[in-house]
């Protein structure tokens, strides 16, 4: 399996971190990374901090595929975990500031509360509608480049929940993930279908190919899934995140498919989005009722965690759309110029 190269640093934290990672695993004190403990370094909005989000993304990626030239033993190196813990604390603070915490619900009301949360989500710019009706091919390629950061991981971040569940919630999650993994058929996995879309659009479909070009908010979308997936204390939030994703995907994916057809990209390029529309109705109900509802019936005190995870998914999707559309309205790309400190 080919591994991506380490990306270019975007600031002092990622530069210092990456300099460590190219050497064999070793113990280093946090005093060697003084910027991490300097409060003013985190004075700005962390969700759009290029340096912080990239450093955290690379820490998390060591639990996925890793990077070329980075020793696999770094994954659980105590020094690196100390750095990650500081970055995660700042990231969680940023999420808490950006995401309104929904009121806690009784277990029997959880499914309806998820439905209401999705329906009441703050409207952002209509990115799916723009891609359907107005986007040119270059803009659609930009959108696909953004999404490649987590679509090429497929269902992996949410799969971390499986060993932490039991009973019907576990069976429901496995059912949802089996669909995402193509029911055992490699060519029908979500990541394989997305790679076909990328190739049909003349894009590089290798894992991590666009990492240097995507901005902090795109990395934050992926980092949220990894944060929730790697920490057992965030199990409820991970399930809520998946439920919100499943419950809100059909309409946008239908619009993405229509946009590609309008641009003449062909049936093969649209198949990933067509498959999402076809497959999402049943998983959405399974996610809300059996997975999340069943989990909260087993753990009533964690209903708020489930709703918070769903709210995080909805909020970050809106912030991502705001970033992309604000750039396009000004006539500039939504991706970063490679080597730039800021997008």
Image (tube, rainbow, N blue to C red):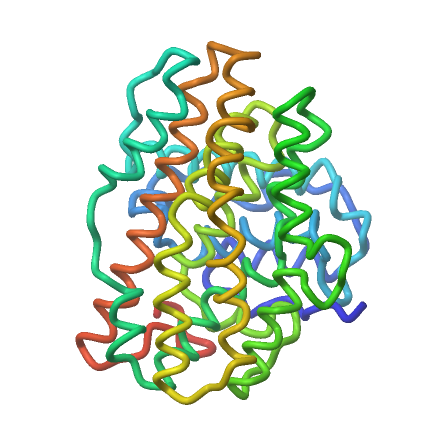
Where residue 177 appears, x then y in whole percent?
65, 45
Number of marks drawn: 0
Which residue does the image show at 48% across and 64% down from the upper left?
Answer: 147
Residue 70, image quadrant: bottom right
Is 118 situated above or below 253?
Answer: above
Looking at the rendering, in which quadrant would you find the C terminus?
bottom left
Is 335 situated above or below 49?
Answer: below
Where residue 143 appears, x then y in whole percent?
40, 71
Say left or right for 114 vs 272.
left
Where residue 271 appears, x then y in whole percent?
54, 72
304 or 268: which is nearer to us? 268
Which residue does the image show at 41% across and 76% down from the upper left?
Answer: 142
Looking at the rendering, in which quadrant would you find the N terminus?
bottom right
Asked whether the viewer can see residue 234, the reply is no
Say left or right for 87 vs 109.
right
Which residue does the image show at 29% across and 33% down from the upper left?
Answer: 117
Say left or right for 336 vs 212.
left
Asked whether the viewer can see residue 158, the reply is yes
Which residue does the image show at 61% across and 63% down from the upper left?
Answer: 152
Where residue 44 appears, x then y in whole percent?
29, 47
321 or 62: which is nearer to us? 321
């Amino acid at each position: 399996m080919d591994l991506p190269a380490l990306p270019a640093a975007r600031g002092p934290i990622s530069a210092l971190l990456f300099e460590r990672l190219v050497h064999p695993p070793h113990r280093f004190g946090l005093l060697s990374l003084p910027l991490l403990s300097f409060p003013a370094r985190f004075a700005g909005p962390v969700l759009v901090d290029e340096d912080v989000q990239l450093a955290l993304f690379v820490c998390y990626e060591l639990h996925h595929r890793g990077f070329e030239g980075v020793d696999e033993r770094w994954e659980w190196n105590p020094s690196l975990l100390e750095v990650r813990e500081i970055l995660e604390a700042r990231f969680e603070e940023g999420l808490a500031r950006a995401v309104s915490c929904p009121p806690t619900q009784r277990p029997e009301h959880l499914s309806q509360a998820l439905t209401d949360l999705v329906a009441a989500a703050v409207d952002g710019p209509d990115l799916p509608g723009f891609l359907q009706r107005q986007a040119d091919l270059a803009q659609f390629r930009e959108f696909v480049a953004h999404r490649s950061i987590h679509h090429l991981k497929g269902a992996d971040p949410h799969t971390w929940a499986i060993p932490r569940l039991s009973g019907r919630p576990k069976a429901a999650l496995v059912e949802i993930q089996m669909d995402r993994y193509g029911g055992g058929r490699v060519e029908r996995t979500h990541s394989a279908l997305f790679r076909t879309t990328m190739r049909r659009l003349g894009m590089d479909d290798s894992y991590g190919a666009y990492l240097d070009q995507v901005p902090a908010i795109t990395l934050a979308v992926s980092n949220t899934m990894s944060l929730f997936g790697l920490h057992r204390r965030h199990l409820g939030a991970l399930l809520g995140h998946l439920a919100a994703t499943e419950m809100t995907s059909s309409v946008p994916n239908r619009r993405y498919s229509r946009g590609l057809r309008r641009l003449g990209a062909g049936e093969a390029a649209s198949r990933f989005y067509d498959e999402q529309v076809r497959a999402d109705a049943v998983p959405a109900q399974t996610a809300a009722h059996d997975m999340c509802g069943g989990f909260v019936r087993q753990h009533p005190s964690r209903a708020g965690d489930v709703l918070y995870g769903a709210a995080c998914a909805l909020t970050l999707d809106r912030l991502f759309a705001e970033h992309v559309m604000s750039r396009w309205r000004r006539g500039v790309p939504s991706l970063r110029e490679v080597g730039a400190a800021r997008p």
